[in-house]
Image (cartoon, helix red, strand yellow):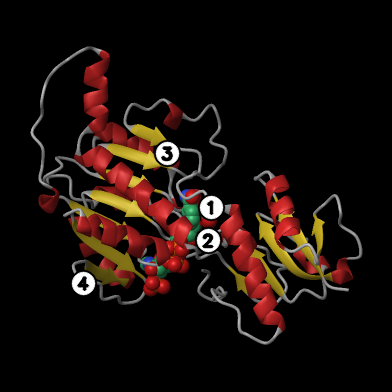
Amino acid sequence: MSAILLAIMGWDPKNWDQLFRALSPQRDIRLWPEQARNPADITYACVWKPPHGMLAEHRNLKAVFSLGAGVDDILTDIELPNVPIVRVVDADLTMRMTEYVVLHVLKYHRQQRLYESQQRVRMWHEHEQAVASDVSVGVMGLGELGYASAIALQRLGFRVHGWSRTQKIIPGVETFYGAVGLEPFLRRAEILVCLLPSTPGTRGILNLDTFRRLKFNGAMHGAYLINAARGDLQVDADIIVALDEGTLAGATLDVFPVEPLPVTSPLWTHPKVTVTPHNAAQSSPRSIVSNILRQIDRFEVGVPLDHVVDRRRGY
Ligand code: NAP
Ligand code: GLV
């Protein structure tokens, strides 16, 4: 007996369940917790924010597939079985994230919030517009999503630089890496885009000390933050202090330490903040499910899995 377990928290599991059944009718699919029985039957688990300790109950697991790109909710399970963890790398997801980053960089660059506020009071007034090649955008994380976003911004003419853990060479993008590269990277960034994974080395990195190092006297006349990675990378209280003291001129936040963002959070109504509900790169379930099923089919005939997470690195 070999069954696939779907354990999905925080998203509606129905569509995923239907897709797995439709695309692989011959397989035994079990939706957790309703259809959880005989844990020994389960050989693959496809998960999003699974309750910690739950995977350890399945002693015949051969692999765990994350339904998202980030795997922090899986890797922080101290009882996680010692099997490969596979994450999502998907062209559709990468494109959606690139769109989100470009949209919000342009929103700041083209002063869109200002023009919207003028429209509300019927004010016809043009402002000086910086040329993109004078605007520095710093992308933290140059993996699947950061790399694609950096290239798209560079093609739009922005001055793009990036920061990663290990050295990268990307034509047209100035790159920095490691702890020593952080300071010069931040000093150049007028618009800081965060696409880092959440790991012990990155959590809390978007704090007041970081914001105060950004370039606030460049073509944008201020520094801006776009975090579309994970909420625990940012310190919400520091973002508010930075906005109120003028260290940050604006922030776009797709992710938060607590999600959904509590209705009492001052971020909801802050005039310099754009909040989106963790949908920067809402994945296409069909594309992800097809990919997982293809990987399982190949794995069962001995082909190695793609996009296996390095558990020591944490991403
Ligand atoms: P990835 O391919 O694993 O890339 C991660 C990048 O971060 C790599 O360039 C890596 O450096 C760098 N990095 C990791 N730790 C670092 C450190 N301590 N210092 C400096 N750089 C570090 O990940 P991805 O697919 O681009 O996804 C990034 C994150 O986006 C995910 O982990 C997830 O949390 C988030 N995400 C959010 C959404 C959303 O809708 N909001 C959707 C999808 C993903 P190296 O290149 O040197 O390894
Ligand atoms: C979404 O946040 C993902 O990690 O895919």
Task: Name the amino acid type tagged 1.
Answer: Ser
Closer to the camera in the image, 31 or 297 = 297
Quarter location, residue 129: top left
Looking at the image, which residue is at 17% across and 15% down? 123
Q: Which residue is mark 1?
A: 283
* Mark 1 nearby-residue class (10 Å; few <14, some 14–19, many ≥20): many
Q: Nearer the viewer, mark 1 or mark 3?
A: 1
Q: CA distance from mark 3 to mark 2?
A: 27 Å
Q: Nearer the viewer, residue 311 or 236?
A: 311
Residue 54 position by quadrant: bottom right
Please name the amino acid that badge 3 sits on: Ala
What amino acid is found at the position of numbered circle 2 in the picture?
A: Ala
Residue type at the position of mark 4? Pro
| Percent of width and height locating residue 270 | 37, 27
Quickly name the residue at label 2.
69
Give left or right: position of 78 versus 54. left
